[in-house]
Image: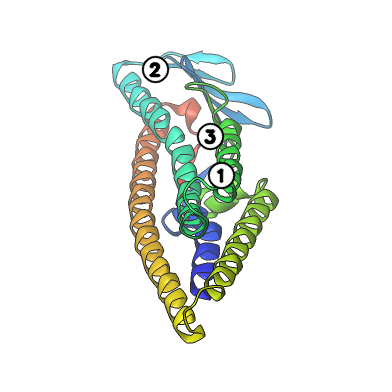
Amino acid sequence: MPKILILLLFTSLSSFSILAEQCTVNFNYGVIIDPNHIRMIEHGQTVVQINGENQLFVTGREIELNHEQKQLITQFSLGIRGQVPEIVSIAIEGVDIGLKAVNKAIGSLTGENSASQQKIQSKFDELKWRIRTRFNQSANNYYIAPQDFADFDDIFTGEFEQEIEEIISDSIGTILLAVGEAMISDDSSSRGSEQRLSTFDERMETMGKDLELEISASANALKSKAEQFCLKLTKLDEIESKIHLSIKPLKQFNLIETN
Protein backbone atom coordinates (compact mmCIF):
# COMPACT_ATOMS: atom_id res chain seq x y z
CA MET A 1 0.00 0.00 0.00
CA PRO A 2 2.75 2.58 0.67
CA LYS A 3 3.82 2.09 -2.96
CA ILE A 4 0.40 3.29 -4.13
CA LEU A 5 0.46 6.34 -1.87
CA ILE A 6 3.95 7.26 -3.06
CA LEU A 7 2.87 6.78 -6.68
CA LEU A 8 -0.18 9.01 -6.25
CA LEU A 9 1.81 11.71 -4.48
CA PHE A 10 4.49 11.63 -7.17
CA THR A 11 1.89 11.81 -9.95
CA SER A 12 -0.05 14.68 -8.45
CA LEU A 13 3.02 16.77 -7.68
CA SER A 14 5.04 16.07 -10.83
CA SER A 15 2.48 16.04 -13.65
CA PHE A 16 2.87 19.80 -14.06
CA SER A 17 6.63 19.57 -14.52
CA ILE A 18 6.64 17.40 -17.65
CA LEU A 19 7.17 20.35 -19.95
CA ALA A 20 9.91 21.73 -17.74
CA GLU A 21 12.06 18.78 -18.78
CA GLN A 22 11.62 19.67 -22.45
CA CYS A 23 11.63 23.43 -22.87
CA THR A 24 14.30 26.09 -22.69
CA VAL A 25 12.10 28.79 -24.21
CA ASN A 26 11.14 32.19 -22.78
CA PHE A 27 8.33 34.61 -23.51
CA ASN A 28 9.82 38.04 -22.87
CA TYR A 29 6.43 39.79 -23.07
CA GLY A 30 2.88 39.05 -22.06
CA VAL A 31 0.66 37.86 -24.90
CA ILE A 32 -3.06 38.56 -25.28
CA ILE A 33 -4.99 36.80 -28.03
CA ASP A 34 -8.56 37.44 -29.14
CA PRO A 35 -10.24 36.54 -32.44
CA ASN A 36 -9.11 39.78 -34.11
CA HIS A 37 -5.83 40.76 -32.42
CA ILE A 38 -2.56 39.52 -31.02
CA ARG A 39 -0.92 41.91 -28.56
CA MET A 40 2.48 41.87 -26.90
CA ILE A 41 2.30 43.55 -23.49
CA GLU A 42 5.03 45.23 -21.44
CA HIS A 43 4.22 46.77 -18.06
CA GLY A 44 0.52 46.81 -18.94
CA GLN A 45 1.07 48.59 -22.26
CA THR A 46 0.68 47.18 -25.78
CA VAL A 47 4.01 47.45 -27.58
CA VAL A 48 3.23 45.29 -30.62
CA GLN A 49 -0.17 44.51 -32.10
CA ILE A 50 -1.18 42.36 -35.07
CA ASN A 51 -4.67 42.91 -36.43
CA GLY A 52 -6.10 40.05 -38.45
CA GLU A 53 -3.18 38.06 -39.81
CA ASN A 54 -0.72 40.74 -40.91
CA GLN A 55 -1.67 44.34 -40.09
CA LEU A 56 1.18 45.43 -37.83
CA PHE A 57 1.38 48.20 -35.22
CA VAL A 58 4.52 48.92 -33.20
CA THR A 59 4.13 51.25 -30.18
CA GLY A 60 0.84 52.44 -31.67
CA ARG A 61 2.17 53.24 -35.15
CA GLU A 62 1.12 51.19 -38.16
CA ILE A 63 4.05 49.70 -40.09
CA GLU A 64 3.72 49.43 -43.86
CA LEU A 65 4.65 45.96 -45.03
CA ASN A 66 5.57 44.51 -48.40
CA HIS A 67 4.28 41.14 -49.58
CA GLU A 68 7.16 39.12 -48.12
CA GLN A 69 6.92 40.87 -44.77
CA LYS A 70 3.18 40.24 -44.62
CA GLN A 71 3.83 36.56 -45.23
CA LEU A 72 6.28 36.45 -42.32
CA ILE A 73 3.85 38.21 -39.98
CA THR A 74 1.07 35.84 -41.07
CA GLN A 75 3.26 32.79 -40.31
CA PHE A 76 4.16 34.21 -36.93
CA SER A 77 0.62 35.21 -35.94
CA LEU A 78 -0.85 31.84 -36.95
CA GLY A 79 1.88 30.08 -34.98
CA ILE A 80 1.20 32.12 -31.85
CA ARG A 81 -2.53 31.48 -32.19
CA GLY A 82 -1.82 27.77 -32.41
CA GLN A 83 0.65 27.44 -29.55
CA VAL A 84 -0.68 29.68 -26.77
CA PRO A 85 -3.87 27.58 -26.35
CA GLU A 86 -1.63 24.50 -26.31
CA ILE A 87 -0.02 25.75 -23.09
CA VAL A 88 -3.39 25.62 -21.32
CA SER A 89 -4.21 22.24 -22.85
CA ILE A 90 -0.97 20.70 -21.56
CA ALA A 91 -1.60 22.04 -18.05
CA ILE A 92 -5.14 20.62 -17.99
CA GLU A 93 -3.89 17.24 -19.17
CA GLY A 94 -1.33 17.29 -16.37
CA VAL A 95 -4.15 17.73 -13.85
CA ASP A 96 -6.10 14.92 -15.54
CA ILE A 97 -3.26 12.45 -15.05
CA GLY A 98 -3.36 13.03 -11.30
CA LEU A 99 -7.18 13.04 -11.24
CA LYS A 100 -7.51 9.71 -13.03
CA ALA A 101 -4.94 8.03 -10.80
CA VAL A 102 -6.60 9.24 -7.60
CA ASN A 103 -10.09 8.41 -8.89
CA LYS A 104 -9.07 4.89 -9.85
CA ALA A 105 -7.52 4.23 -6.45
CA ILE A 106 -10.49 5.60 -4.51
CA GLY A 107 -12.98 3.88 -6.83
CA SER A 108 -11.24 0.53 -6.35
CA LEU A 109 -11.46 0.84 -2.57
CA THR A 110 -14.80 2.59 -2.04
CA GLY A 111 -16.67 1.70 -5.24
CA GLU A 112 -17.19 3.61 -8.46
CA ASN A 113 -19.16 6.87 -8.02
CA SER A 114 -18.93 6.60 -4.24
CA ALA A 115 -19.41 9.73 -2.16
CA SER A 116 -15.66 9.81 -1.47
CA GLN A 117 -14.77 9.55 -5.13
CA GLN A 118 -17.30 12.21 -6.15
CA LYS A 119 -16.00 14.59 -3.47
CA ILE A 120 -12.40 14.38 -4.72
CA GLN A 121 -13.43 14.54 -8.37
CA SER A 122 -15.49 17.69 -7.79
CA LYS A 123 -12.42 19.38 -6.28
CA PHE A 124 -10.25 18.43 -9.23
CA ASP A 125 -12.93 19.57 -11.69
CA GLU A 126 -13.11 22.95 -9.99
CA LEU A 127 -9.31 23.26 -10.06
CA LYS A 128 -9.22 22.48 -13.80
CA TRP A 129 -11.95 25.04 -14.43
CA ARG A 130 -10.06 27.72 -12.49
CA ILE A 131 -6.80 27.00 -14.33
CA ARG A 132 -8.56 27.20 -17.68
CA THR A 133 -10.40 30.45 -16.88
CA ARG A 134 -7.20 31.99 -15.49
CA PHE A 135 -5.54 31.79 -18.91
CA ASN A 136 -8.54 31.38 -21.22
CA GLN A 137 -11.03 34.05 -20.18
CA SER A 138 -13.59 33.13 -22.85
CA ALA A 139 -13.77 31.35 -26.20
CA ASN A 140 -10.63 32.10 -28.27
CA ASN A 141 -9.37 34.69 -25.74
CA TYR A 142 -6.08 33.90 -24.00
CA TYR A 143 -3.56 35.67 -21.81
CA ILE A 144 -0.06 34.37 -21.02
CA ALA A 145 2.31 36.42 -18.85
CA PRO A 146 6.04 36.81 -19.60
CA GLN A 147 7.68 33.58 -18.43
CA ASP A 148 10.32 30.93 -18.77
CA PHE A 149 8.80 27.65 -19.93
CA ALA A 150 11.62 25.77 -18.20
CA ASP A 151 9.65 26.66 -15.04
CA PHE A 152 6.39 25.52 -16.56
CA ASP A 153 5.20 23.87 -13.36
CA ASP A 154 5.41 27.21 -11.53
CA ILE A 155 3.29 28.94 -14.17
CA PHE A 156 0.23 26.93 -13.27
CA THR A 157 0.82 25.56 -9.79
CA GLY A 158 2.16 28.72 -8.17
CA GLU A 159 -1.12 30.40 -7.35
CA PHE A 160 -2.92 27.07 -6.94
CA GLU A 161 -0.23 25.37 -4.87
CA GLN A 162 -2.09 25.37 -1.55
CA GLU A 163 -5.29 24.12 -3.17
CA ILE A 164 -3.42 21.29 -4.94
CA GLU A 165 -1.78 20.27 -1.66
CA GLU A 166 -5.18 20.22 0.09
CA ILE A 167 -6.68 18.04 -2.65
CA ILE A 168 -3.75 15.63 -2.45
CA SER A 169 -4.04 15.52 1.35
CA ASP A 170 -7.79 14.85 1.17
CA SER A 171 -7.22 12.17 -1.48
CA ILE A 172 -4.61 10.32 0.54
CA GLY A 173 -6.73 10.64 3.68
CA THR A 174 -9.75 9.22 1.87
CA ILE A 175 -7.68 6.31 0.52
CA LEU A 176 -6.27 5.52 3.98
CA LEU A 177 -9.75 5.63 5.49
CA ALA A 178 -11.04 3.28 2.80
CA VAL A 179 -8.12 0.93 3.41
CA GLY A 180 -8.90 0.88 7.13
CA GLU A 181 -12.56 0.12 6.47
CA ALA A 182 -11.61 -2.63 4.02
CA MET A 183 -9.27 -4.24 6.56
CA ILE A 184 -11.94 -4.09 9.29
CA SER A 185 -14.37 -5.73 6.88
CA ASP A 186 -11.83 -8.45 6.15
CA ASP A 187 -11.22 -8.94 9.87
CA SER A 188 -14.90 -9.73 10.36
CA SER A 189 -14.77 -12.57 7.87
CA SER A 190 -14.14 -16.19 8.76
CA ARG A 191 -10.79 -16.40 6.95
CA GLY A 192 -7.56 -16.67 8.88
CA SER A 193 -5.65 -13.46 9.58
CA GLU A 194 -2.67 -14.48 7.43
CA GLN A 195 -4.94 -15.30 4.49
CA ARG A 196 -6.81 -11.99 4.89
CA LEU A 197 -3.59 -10.01 4.88
CA SER A 198 -2.24 -11.94 1.91
CA THR A 199 -5.42 -11.35 -0.11
CA PHE A 200 -5.45 -7.67 0.81
CA ASP A 201 -1.78 -7.22 -0.09
CA GLU A 202 -2.35 -8.91 -3.45
CA ARG A 203 -5.26 -6.58 -4.14
CA MET A 204 -3.18 -3.53 -3.32
CA GLU A 205 -0.22 -4.78 -5.35
CA THR A 206 -2.45 -5.36 -8.40
CA MET A 207 -3.93 -1.89 -8.04
CA GLY A 208 -0.46 -0.36 -7.78
CA LYS A 209 0.74 -2.08 -10.94
CA ASP A 210 -2.37 -1.04 -12.88
CA LEU A 211 -1.96 2.56 -11.76
CA GLU A 212 1.71 2.59 -12.62
CA LEU A 213 1.03 1.36 -16.16
CA GLU A 214 -1.79 3.84 -16.70
CA ILE A 215 0.17 6.79 -15.32
CA SER A 216 3.25 5.90 -17.35
CA ALA A 217 1.28 5.71 -20.60
CA SER A 218 -0.49 9.04 -19.94
CA ALA A 219 2.71 10.78 -18.87
CA ASN A 220 4.58 9.57 -21.97
CA ALA A 221 1.79 10.84 -24.23
CA LEU A 222 1.84 14.23 -22.51
CA LYS A 223 5.63 14.34 -22.66
CA SER A 224 5.47 13.80 -26.43
CA LYS A 225 2.91 16.58 -26.74
CA ALA A 226 5.13 18.89 -24.68
CA GLU A 227 8.13 18.10 -26.87
CA GLN A 228 6.13 19.04 -29.99
CA PHE A 229 4.98 22.25 -28.31
CA CYS A 230 8.55 23.27 -27.52
CA LEU A 231 9.75 22.35 -31.00
CA LYS A 232 7.07 24.54 -32.58
CA LEU A 233 8.01 27.45 -30.32
CA THR A 234 11.62 27.02 -31.43
CA LYS A 235 10.55 27.16 -35.08
CA LEU A 236 8.49 30.28 -34.31
CA ASP A 237 11.62 31.82 -32.84
CA GLU A 238 13.36 31.22 -36.18
CA ILE A 239 10.51 32.99 -37.99
CA GLU A 240 10.74 35.85 -35.51
CA SER A 241 14.47 36.18 -36.24
CA LYS A 242 13.66 36.57 -39.95
CA ILE A 243 11.07 39.19 -39.06
CA HIS A 244 13.64 41.17 -37.08
CA LEU A 245 15.99 41.19 -40.06
CA SER A 246 13.25 42.33 -42.41
CA ILE A 247 11.13 44.68 -40.25
CA LYS A 248 13.47 46.99 -38.34
CA PRO A 249 10.90 48.52 -35.91
CA LEU A 250 10.27 45.03 -34.51
CA LYS A 251 13.93 44.26 -33.84
CA GLN A 252 13.80 45.67 -30.30
CA PHE A 253 10.77 43.54 -29.38
CA ASN A 254 11.87 39.92 -29.14
CA LEU A 255 8.96 37.83 -27.86
CA ILE A 256 10.43 34.31 -28.07
CA GLU A 257 13.88 33.52 -26.74
CA THR A 258 15.42 30.05 -26.94
CA ASN A 259 18.43 28.90 -24.93
Q: Say above or below: 160 vs 105.
A: above
From this viewpoint, is residue 30 visible? no
**Residue at left offset 59%, top offset 50%:** 116
Question: Is disc 3 surrounded by few (<14), some (14 to 19) or many (20+) residues within 10 Å?
Answer: few
Mark 1 vs mark 3, CA separation in Å: 52 Å
Disc ID at residue 152 = none
Q: Nearer the viewer, residue 180 or 61?
A: 180
Amino acid bearing label 3: Gln
Amino acid of disc 2: Asn
Residue to which mark 1 is pinned: 118
Residue 157: x and y in percent read 61, 49
Give the residue displayed 60% in from the left and 29% down from the top.
Answer: 41
Q: Which element type, helix, strand or loop, lies under badge 1?
A: helix
As shown in the figure, which amino acid type bears the numbered disc 1? Gln
Q: Residue furthest front?
A: 190
Residue 252: which numbered mark, if any?
A: 3
Closer to viewer: mark 2 or mark 1: 1
